[in-house]
Amino acid sequence: MYHGFMVTLEHQIVAPQKKRWTVDELLAMEKAGLLDPEKRIELLDGEVYEMPPTSEGHASSVDWLVRLFLKQFDERAVVRSQNPIRLDDEDLPLPDLALLEWKEDFYRQGHPRPENVYLVVEVSDATLWFDRSSKLKRYAKAGLREVWIVNLKDRQTEVFRDPSGEEYLTRFVVKPGESVAPLAFPDDPIPPL
């Protein structure tokens, strides 16, 4: 009661809403200069992730793989390193390496789509759990044919093939001293890291 009048307060409880981003929104922000170009930003399932700094071991492994893939697949495939692949409207990862269908313009007209991707390679040390869970699910859901996770900690390459839903039906490990060939180039095995 307030001076003989009854006051009714209505409280409306509203939880903060998480903003989901689209690839187009993220690319527009990048084009407008709103994103720090020094940071590695990935969009997965509509959420923006800032990737951790790259270690020396990670960087040298990626460089070695890029050199090897360029020599081995020159003019048969585009080798893309740490650049976006547009999986769908809410997913724009930056895989460490991607082996793509050959295009003379190197995808100048737009980021590659799942149907353009032969193979994605993620080199993992600090991001191993993230690569095996969140990223691998998004790759499978998009239908990427093949993903390799180069596990620096255990010195092995984990190969994932045959996407179904959010998982891969075929999984195997390539140990030091063994080699593996991409599905798209079965006669071109890659030596281990």
Image (cartoon, helix red, strand yellow):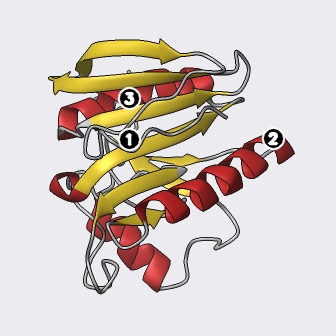
Image disc number at residue 57: 2
Q: Disc 3 to disc 1, how far (Cα)?
A: 23 Å
- Closer to the chain start, of discs 3 and 2, is 2
Q: Is residue 50 left or right of residue 20?
A: right
Dot 1: element: loop
| Location of residue 179 with respect to 55 vertically, above or below | above
Q: Is residue 115 left or right of residue 133?
A: left
| Residue found 39% across the figure and 44% down from its top | 188
Q: Amino acid at mark 2?
A: Gly
Residue 90 on image: x %, y %: 27, 50
Does residue 94 appear anywhere in the picture? no
- Closer to the chain start, of discs 1 and 2, is 1
| Residue found 19% across the figure and 24% down from its top | 162
Look at the image and tell me in which quarter the N terminus lies.
top left
Camera-side residue: 135 or 20?
Answer: 135
Dot 3: element: helix
Are discs 3 and 1 less than 8 Å apart at CB? Answer: no
Dot 2: element: helix
Image disc number at residue 136: 3
Q: Is residue 17 left or right of residue 141?
A: right
Q: Amino acid at mark 1?
A: Lys
Are discs 1 and 2 less than 8 Å apart at CB? Answer: no
Q: Amino acid at mark 3?
A: Leu
Mark 3 closeness class: few <14, some 14–19, many ≥20 residues within 10 Å: many
Residue 145 on image: x %, y %: 23, 37
Image disc number at residue 18: 1
- Closer to the chain start, of discs 3 and 1, is 1
Look at the image and tell me in which quarter the C terminus lies.
top right
